[in-house]
Image (spheres, rainbow, N blue to C red):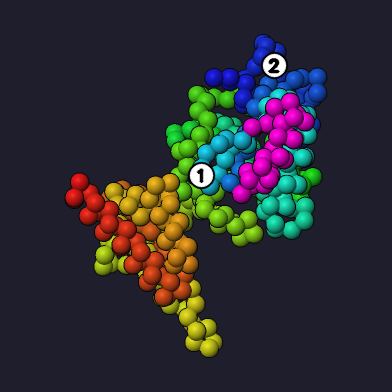
Amino acid sequence: MDHGMYPGNKRSNEDISSGLNDNKRNRNIPSTRTEYRFLIAASDSNAIFGRNGENYQSLRNKYHNQIDISQVQTPERVLIFYGDEDRAMSILADILPIMAQNQGVRPGFVELRAMIHSSQAGAVIGKSGDRIKEFRQKYNLDTKVFPNATPGDTTERILSLRGELPNIVECLKEVYSILDQTPVRGPIRIYDPSFYDGVDVERYGGFGENHDFQATRTRFNPNQQQQHSGNYNNRNNTNHMNYSQNNGPMPTTVQVTIPNALSSSILGPRCSRIAQIRQQSGCVIKFDDPLPSNDRIISIIGMPNNIIQAQYLMQTAVKQWTNATVSS
């Protein structure tokens, strides 16, 4: 494996941190990075490819095949640039407008998710989150380093940047400058989107089916405490129903508990079944991490009738899986 894919791996014995500060790279010291990796939604990947792959082929010709996108049928892809930082930033300047148009939040606004080594995440976050806060203020960006590594026992974490195109590029340059001063510690295990995990996307910074770029991100709060009880069939933990002034029902949340072993029956291959249940019921359905008891909490958010439909579809999925298991 080429360990030059992350900053901090030295080509020589010189001290690459000499003469650098937090805000400006010393151009006399070459970056050791040879790959720039980004996690992108499948819809962004399709936009970059363009009709019949014309956009993608044009970019590869322009940059002499120094751009690649993983070819997998999952809701997310890995976008890779090869070469030095100047070339990578040039490629990015061509690709970000395509992503911004596809994401459709507003003109010139884009979300980019860079992949960094887990051992370097602390340098980007800073003490007590000071550096992330500085990025937000300095570049007027929504910035976040997600708490979990990408699926498949990898050593990659996601840095999300949301804001205006030029600010994304300038912030990313500073991030890479910081990473070049922060040697990678431990092994390097990169993310293969074939190991996509639709259950944990909110914690590792992945993309779910039909990701909505205009929706406000739900920030992960590791200190949030929830009370869970009951099982899937008959003991639900349900929030009190709220009503508007005309007594119309408002969206509510129902939490159900199932044995973790049954999760796959509801998720289906590559999360195809849960995507169908979400679409048919119109509910937001979220899976928590397994509990110490080896149970799992599922939160169903929606209107009362929609929640009932989602529960029915989930129960049907479990029954079908159980019957198939018994018959086999």
> Eyeballing the image, is 105 above or below 182?
below
> Eyeballing the image, is 42 above or below 212?
above
Pointer 1 residue: 74
For the question of whether residue 253 can be seen, the reply is no
Observer-nearest of 67 and 140: 67
- As drawn, is 189 to the left or to the right of 233? right
* Residue found 62% across the figure and 21% down from its top: 4
Magenta stretch holds residue 81: no
Number of residues whose C-alpha sits closer than 10 Å to that of mark 1, classed few (under 14), some (14–19) or many (20 or more): many
Magenta stretch holds residue 55: yes
Q: CA distance from mark 1 to mark 2?
A: 41 Å
Q: Position of residue 211 (x, y in %)?
A: 57, 54
Observer-nearest of 141 and 223: 141
Q: Which mark is residue 209?
A: none
Give, as a single range, the part of the protein colored magenta. 43-68
Does dot 2 land on a helix, a strand or a loop? loop
